Amino acid sequence: MSNLVAYVDGASLGNPGPSGIGVVMDGAQDGKIRIAKSIGRQDNNVAEYVALLEALQCALTLRAETLHVYSDSEVLVKQMRGEYSCRSPRLYSLNWICRKLAHSFHFSISHIPRESNSEANGLASSAVREQFL
């Protein structure tokens, strides 16, 4: 069992527009894990949730005991904490899935400034750019 820390970010060119996610996972036995994926045409909030979902699924695969997530999306963090409600049906569904998966660990999530999330942001941005190659 491991204690993992994930930095997550979603990027979208336009809202909606071509989107990507970036995840940086620290604490895995084999070292830092970096994930960058294109997720098609989405809005920025969906991209943030898909990045969180990717981190949760990765932590499940690694059989993590604890997972602490850092995100620069205040909406994501406050919705996951139950401080904001999800009015969008799509976000509600993603929030429900993420909260369900989060029960698999000792889970926590914190908001950080964008400049403190530069590696995950760079991965998400590179995933968006790949759609144009």
Image: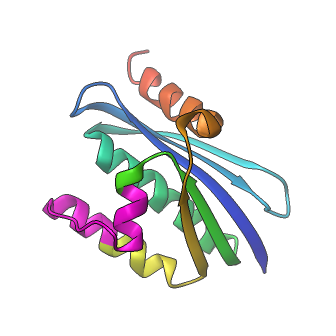
Where in the figure is residue 100, as x and y percent of width and height? 41, 81
* Residue name at image x 78 percent, y 50 percent: 32
Where in the figure is residue 81, as x and y percent of width and height? 41, 72
Where in the figure is residue 59, as x and y percent of width and height? 63, 68
- In the image, residue 82 sits, relative to residue 112, either above or below, namely below
In the image, 92 versus 20, the foreground residue is 92
Marks counted in the figure total 0
* Residue name at image x 45 percent, y 21 percent: 129
Where in the figure is residue 58, as x and y percent of width and height? 60, 63
- In the image, residue 81 sits, relative to residue 1, either above or below, namely above
Specify the farthest residue to the right: 30
Instruction: Determine the image quadrant of residue 2.
Output: bottom right
Specify the farthest residue to the top: 133
State which quarter of the image contains the C terminus: top left
By secondary structure, the bulk of the magenta-drawn segment is best described as helix
- In the image, residue 66 sits, relative to residue 24, either above or below, namely below
Relative placement, left or right, of 83 versus 21 is left
Q: What stretch is highlighted in magenta?
A: 76-95
In the image, 78 versus 98, the foreground residue is 78
Relative placement, left or right, of 28 versus 93 is right
Instruction: Determine the image quadrant of residue 106.
Output: bottom right
Coloring basis for residues? rainbow
In the image, 64 versus 73, the foreground residue is 73
Instruction: Determine the image quadrant of residue 11.
Output: top left
Q: In the rendered structure, does residue 94 fall within the stretch colored magenta?
A: yes
State which quarter of the image contains the N terminus: bottom right
* Residue name at image x 34 percent, y 54 percent: 75
